[in-house]
Image (cartoon, rainbow, N blue to C red):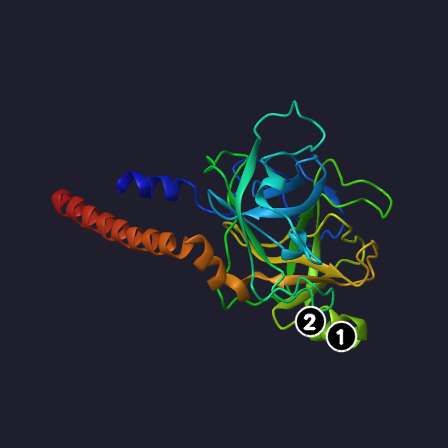
Amino acid sequence: MFNFYVQLKANDCGKVQIETPELKIFDKNLQNSIPGQWPWVVSLLLIDNNFICGSSLISKKHLLSVAHCIQFGNFTLQPRSLYALLGRHNLSDETEENWIKSNISEIFVHSDYNKSSRSFRSKADISILVLKKVVIFTKFIQPICLPQSTVNTINIDGFVIGYGQNSEDEKPREIAKYFVMHSINPWDCSLLNRSYSKIISRDSFCARNENAALCPGDSGSGFEIKNSKSFTLYGLVSQCLNSTNCNPDDYTVFVDVAKYIHWIYEKTGLKAIVRIVTILHRIERKFKNKIHFFTEDKIA
């Protein structure tokens, strides 16, 4: 049990393990990432090596993405038809080190997702992909933290990282880029443009950056919040008004991850692990306090 606890504690979520440039939340420009800067960003590719979507590593065996990357119309991708690249920086450079390719063993798509209609696609537009093998965390492969069910997703700034196209006519980026987006209430999107009412739900939020736009291929990418110690996954890129357009004037609809946290825990079993770690943290604190008291008593 102690070894299990040490392993979990040594790999706390949402922490970057390498030296990176300081992130400036007020810098709205599109920027290139560097290796290891976003170690939970995972690319999903078809077996013909075509990039399809982004995803985020949330445990040693689970990825979180959107449902519309898996189901579209009456067609559903099977686990054997795609794979994941973890720790990969440049998608076109196979000589790059510190990355692994992992097959997918199982896929969960939320039962409330309406796969037959593009309208209200953001409702339950969430999926979990199970890796075939447990991954070993490294400086370049780390999980991101999941939010509590009560977090606020309105009027905040978050980082969005993705391999989507640079423009409407290009292929996916070779290197992930990131920028800051500001979120607003989804119903405010509808006030700005009534067309948004067709693609939002109460389990989503909107965000925009006036200097940069999300493009095709960015679906499934995370909306990440940084506090003093770690990054937390608040949202997933779900839909824009025009899915083939890269327009910075448009808001993007994000899945609100916190609204589905209980479903995520149910499908992954992560809640049990969280409880174990919480209990062990408490035991450790009590143990340290006793050692501290015993040491002071001896010195006195």
Of residues 29 and 194, the one drawn nearer to the viewer in this rendering: 194
Q: Residue at x 55, y 37 (%)?
A: 103
Q: From this view, report whether residue 234 is shown above or below residue 129.
A: below
- Residue 167 placed where, x, y %? 84, 46
Q: From this view, report whether residue 264 is shown above or below residue 54.
A: below
Q: Are marks 1 and 2 in contact (CB under 8 Å)?
A: yes
User: In 3D space, how far apart are the residues under numbered discs 1 and 2 (Cα atoms)?
Assistant: 7 Å
The mark found on residue 190 in the picture is 1
Question: Which residue sits furthest right?
Answer: 169
Q: Badge 2: how crowded within 10 Å, few (<14), some, or many (20+)?
A: many
Question: Which residue sits furthest front?
Answer: 74
Q: From this view, report whether residue 268 is shown above or below residue 177.
A: below
- The amino acid type, in three-letter code, at marker 2 is Pro
- Residue 157 placed where, x, y %? 65, 59
**Looking at the image, can residue 158 be seen?**
yes
- Residue 164 placed where, x, y %? 75, 46
Element under disc 2:
helix
- The amino acid type, in three-letter code, at marker 1 is Ser
Of residues 255 and 24, the one drawn nearer to the viewer in this rendering: 255
Look at mark 2 in the image and give the residue it sits on: 186
**Looking at the image, can residue 193 be seen?**
no
Element under disc 1:
helix
Give left or right: position of 19 versus 29: left
Q: Quadrant of the N terminus?
A: top left
Give left or right: position of 159 versus 28: left
The mark found on residue 243 in the picture is none
Q: Badge 1: how crowded within 10 Å, few (<14), some, or many (20+)?
A: some
Of residues 200 and 89, the one drawn nearer to the viewer in this rendering: 200
